[in-house]
Amino acid sequence: MTLADGFLAHARELASQPAALDEMTRRRIVTASYYALFHQIIQDAADLIGPNVSIEINHRIQRWFDHSAMKQICGRFTKPRLDQPLSGLVGDSVSPELETVCSTFIELQERRHDADYNPGYVIAENDALQHWASAMMAVDAWKRIRATSEANVFILSLLLWKNWEKDR
Amino acid sequence: MTSRLLTRDIISRMSTLTASEALDKAKAEEIISKVELIPEVASIDVELYTDHTGDPAFELTFWLRKDVASDPEFSLRLLEFSRKVQFKILHSDLNRFPYTKLKRAA
């Protein structure tokens, strides 16, 4: 089982409790949901970038990704009309699947931050379940498009966005 | 002219917000007012928000009716609806990410 699958399964297990979910369980669902999507993306990214590296190097590559930079790049991919250099690389807009992945990533990262660090964060049970459902849908959407050109550009942008200026 | 007066009225009522913030909020509220709610959602509130990275954003609060159940099936339906609302904001000219939050009416 991959780390991404493990986090998704963990969130599902927490969400499937027969009794009402307590606050800590709701927070853990949000956190696990975010990490499921995060690890799915960086795992596929490392596989794309280093198809011939050992598993140890693959894991080290996965550590290159920065949460905050990933959020900023996701924001660039959710605009109604992409700006340069993205529009020149993937067209005026991205597929609904990639848009789902990017918007879910941004939303879950914010809520993960609340769930882990904000003592005043109040999360409704429906909210926790919805975050889990959104992670499942986003992972599913990502798996449908991860072998496409736009997904390749997205992955490379996550690491190489600082070089975008050279492409103008 | 009507639009300008409306904007001025909104700004005067929101003295703590800058003109640009008040306009953003008004635009988001206008977009949401055109959305047909699903039966389980009583209303949607819009607030200006700053996320944990410091980016200006919106927080959309979906007020659920108090008798709504917490089950995975409903969560999926609600997710589809909240996504629809979220994308209406994302596809507009507003430059704030619309975070969503659910609350149950008292």
Image (cartoon, rainbow, N blue to C red):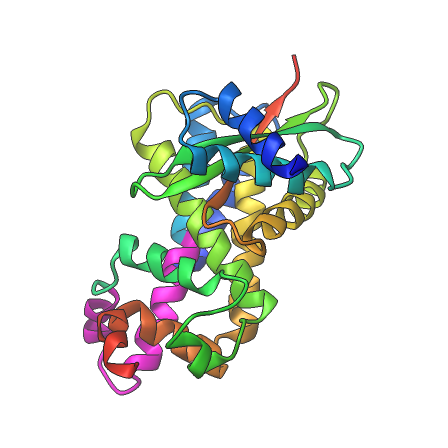
Whether A34 is among the magenta residues is no
Q: In the rendered view of the protein, which quadrant contains the N terminus of chain A?
A: bottom left
Residue furthest to the right: B39
Residue furthest to the top: B106
* Residue located at (45% from left, 46% from top): B96
* Residue A33 visible in the snapshot: no
From what the image shows, is residue B91 above or below residue B10?
A: below
Where is residue A127? Give x, y as percent: 56, 33
Q: Looking at the image, which is closer to me, A140 or A152?
A: A152
* Residue B102 visible in the snapshot: yes
Q: Looking at the image, which is closer to me, A16 or A33?
A: A33
Q: Looking at the image, which is closer to me, B9 or A36?
A: B9
Where is residue A2? Give x, y as percent: 39, 63
Instruction: Report the span colored magenta.
Output: A36-62
**Which image quadrant is residue A88 in?**
bottom left
**Which image quadrant is residue B8 in?**
top right
In the rendered structure, the answer to whether residue A34 lies left or right of residue B88 reads left
Q: In the rendered view of the protein, which quadrant contains the C terminus of chain A?
A: bottom left
**Which image quadrant is residue B106 in?**
top right
Whether A51 is among the magenta residues is yes
* Residue located at (48% from left, 75% from top): A146
Q: Main secondary structure of the magenta part?
A: helix
Q: Looking at the image, which is closer to me, B82 or B6?
A: B6
